[in-house]
Image: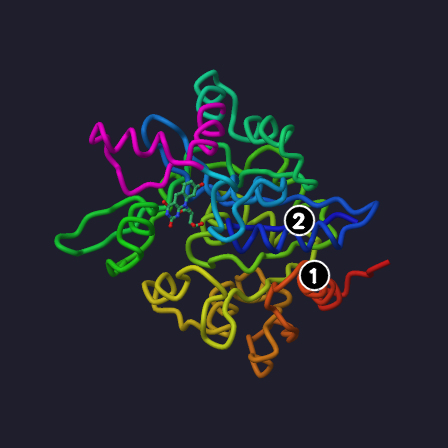
Amino acid sequence: MRIVVLAGGIGGARFLQGVRAFAGAGVEVTAVVNVGDDVTLHGLRICPDLDSVMYTLGGGADAKRGWGRAGETWAVKQELAAYGAEPAWFGLGDRDTATHLVRTRMLDAGYPLSAVTEALCARWRPGVRLLPATDERLETHVVVADPEQRAIHFQEWWIRYHAELPAQRFVFVGAQAAKPAPGVVDAITNADIVLLAPSNPVVSIAPILAVAGLREALVAGPAPVVGVSPIIDGAPVRGMADRCLAAISVPCTAAGVGELYGARSAGGVLDGWLVDSADAKTEVPGVAVRDTPLWMRDESATVSMVRAALDLSGVRVD
Ligand code: FO1
């Protein structure tokens, strides 16, 4: 069986731990990971969602913080601040910096991001295939009006401003020119099921679907597409998806996100939509909705979610 998961960072990584645990022998898991969070700072190319998934599945993540390395130290960050080297608001960890140095050196040598990711995963061995949504530069920038209208990088909006600057819209810079990374379309085309992880629908899943040709491959592909709601009982499982949804005037509900993704039969991507028991009455026109506990309190809870998604899709679970 071949499972493809479209995923962002922190929520996506937790969900992928469950998919990996579910996938015994003979099940191939490919994670197509968002690159919209990627940013160049202090001359280094930083890929937060790819790193969150790689570190979490590789056993090196700081589970509490949700991003970066366990046992992290911050000497480089402190020294940069001593030089007044901006931006001071970005948390550059010492161990994390080694990842950015290796990635930046390989990118500068001409390796595509997919090859860089493969090389980094040779050390971390995440147990699933990690593919960036695209090898091209695609960055989420946020149009804000405070104090005057301007676009800032998603990371600045998220970290420096804690997503408190009202976002007028999100722009996925480079999406139109970006192509799916090598292996992405094949993985989707040959999948038995495609899962949308319970990641931020606006700044994690949308930038993946914005890559030219990726959404089309999903809709035209044979595999059922089942999404997992990142909203439980009107609140995001974690992060600030509520701020992002408000910015695009989508209700922060399981139904709202289900309709944002839309039914495949009506120009959207979903065949099935998994919602939490608290949202059992959710209806999304044209989409089969199933409720099941969605709190990923431990790996076995996440495995049950994966099983429920497969069951909802009708894919036989041997
Ligand atoms: N998130 C923060 O809230 N504060 C930080 O200082 C921070 C630094 C950081 C460094 C590397 C990295 O891979 C991720 C980092 N994140 C940080 C998380 C990052 O902003 C993610 O893009 C978001 O958490 C959304 O996935």
Q: Is residue 20 left or right of residue 282?
A: right
Q: Residues within 10 Å of mark 2 (few under 14, many from 20)?
A: many
Q: Nearer the viewer, residue 143 or 265?
A: 143
Across and down, in percent, residue 241 comes to 41, 62
The structure's colour scheme is rainbow
Magenta-span inclusion, residue 99: yes
**Residue at 61% of width from left, 63% of height from top?**
296
Q: Residues within 10 Å of mark 1 (few under 14, many from 20)?
A: many
Number of the front mark, 2 or 1? 1
Amino acid bearing label 2: Val
Residue 238: image tag: none
Number of on-image labels: 2
- Vertical arrangement, residue 159 with respect to residue 47, above or below: below
**Residue at 52% of width from left, 46% of height from top?**
62
Magenta-span inclusion, residue 293: no
| SS label for mark 1 | helix
- The answer to the question of whether label 2 and label 1 lie on touching residues, with beta carbons closer than 8 A, is no
- Looking at the image, the residue that sits furthest to the right is 318
Amino acid bearing label 1: Val
Q: Which residues are magenta?
A: 73-102
Q: Nearer the viewer, residue 261 or 50?
A: 50
Q: Is residue 249 left or right of residue 133?
A: left
Across and down, in percent, residue 164 comes to 27, 60
- The first of marks 2 and 1 along the sequence is 2
> Pointer 1: what residue?
306
> Pointer 2: what residue?
4
- Vertical arrangement, residue 44 with respect to residue 155, above or below: above
Across and down, in percent, residue 99 comes to 49, 29
